[in-house]
Image: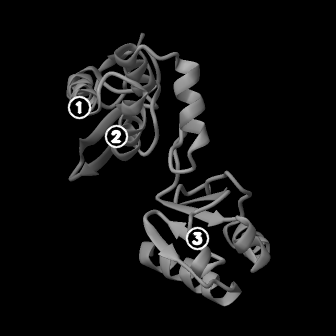
């Protein structure tokens, strides 16, 4: 057991606190275990999982809504989330991880502020998605599946976004971009970089 140096909470794993210093005093903005939930939030999330299960039934049909809930709350499907879903739906953790890793919109690791998903389906590939992926890797200085060191961008290549009518296409978070070429991609990334400045 260790104590967080900022909030003095005793935890079994490394505790990550996001804080700011204001007029010489440290103020905790958000505290959480990396990939885990604190005891105070577990009840809230457990209640939401039960609510989802009541709506969809205690079956595999409730699995995706539960996974989407944790993805939207934490930006990833957490270890505690998987354990909670496993217990409530009586599914193995391996099965849940298999489902979570199958879908491109779910992840079990922390991602950047902007998640860039480039479609590499047959139609996008034939219309030039590969050179766009190479351009993004060069412009961001990362490879597929990586996050920039400043935590701003994560680059993912997905099998299909269902946007064949506007191929080549990509999504950044929930926003869709289609009929892409190198100039459009560079402009989109430049605008996002300027928005952070």
What label sits on residue 170 in the rendered view?
3
Asked if residue 196 lies left or right of residue 146, the reply is left
What label sits on residue 48 in the rendered view?
1
* Callout 1–callout 2 Cβ contact below 8 Å: yes
Q: Which residue is mark 2?
A: 69
Tell me where residue 8 appears, x and y as whole percent: 29, 22
Residue at 47%, 25% (x, y): give it.
Answer: 79
Considering the numbered disc 1 on the image, is that residue within a helix, a strand or a loop? helix
Label 1 crowd bin: few (<14), some (14–19), many (20+), radius 10 Å: some
Residue at 46%, 36% (x, y): give it.
Answer: 77
Quadrant in which the C terminus is drawn: bottom left
Residue at 58%, 86% (x, y): give it.
Answer: 187
Tell me where residue 10 appears, x and y as whole percent: 33, 15
Mark 1 and mark 2 lie on one chain; the one further toward the N terminus is 1
Quadrant in which the N terminus is drawn: top left
Considering the numbered disc 2 on the image, is that residue within a helix, a strand or a loop? helix
Tell me where residue 61 appears, x and y as whole percent: 39, 32
């Amino acid at each position: 057991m260790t104590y967080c140096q900022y909030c003095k909470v005793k935890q079994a794993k490394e505790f990550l606190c996001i804080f700011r210093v204001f007029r010489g005093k440290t103020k905790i903005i958000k505290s959480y275990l990396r990939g885990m939930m604190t005891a105070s939030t577990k009840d809230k999330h457990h209640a939401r999982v039960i609510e989802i299960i009541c709506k969809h039934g205690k079956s595999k049909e409730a699995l995706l809504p539960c996974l989407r809930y944790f993805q939207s709350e934490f930006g990833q499907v957490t270890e505690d989330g998987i354990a909670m879903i496993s217990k409530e739906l009586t599914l193995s953790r391996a099965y849940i991880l298999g489902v979570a890793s199958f879908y491109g919109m779910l992840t079990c690791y922390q991602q950047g502020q902007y998640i860039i998903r480039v479609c590499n389906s047959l139609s996008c590939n034939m219309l030039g998605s590969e050179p766009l992926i190479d351009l993004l890797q060069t412009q961001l200085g990362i490879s597929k599946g990586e996050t920039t060191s400043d935590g701003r961008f994560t680059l993912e290549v997905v099998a299909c976004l269902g946007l064949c009518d506007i191929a080549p296409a990509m999504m950044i978070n929930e926003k869709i971009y289609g009929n892409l070429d190198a100039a459009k991609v560079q402009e989109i990334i430049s605008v996002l970089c300027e928005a952070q400045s």
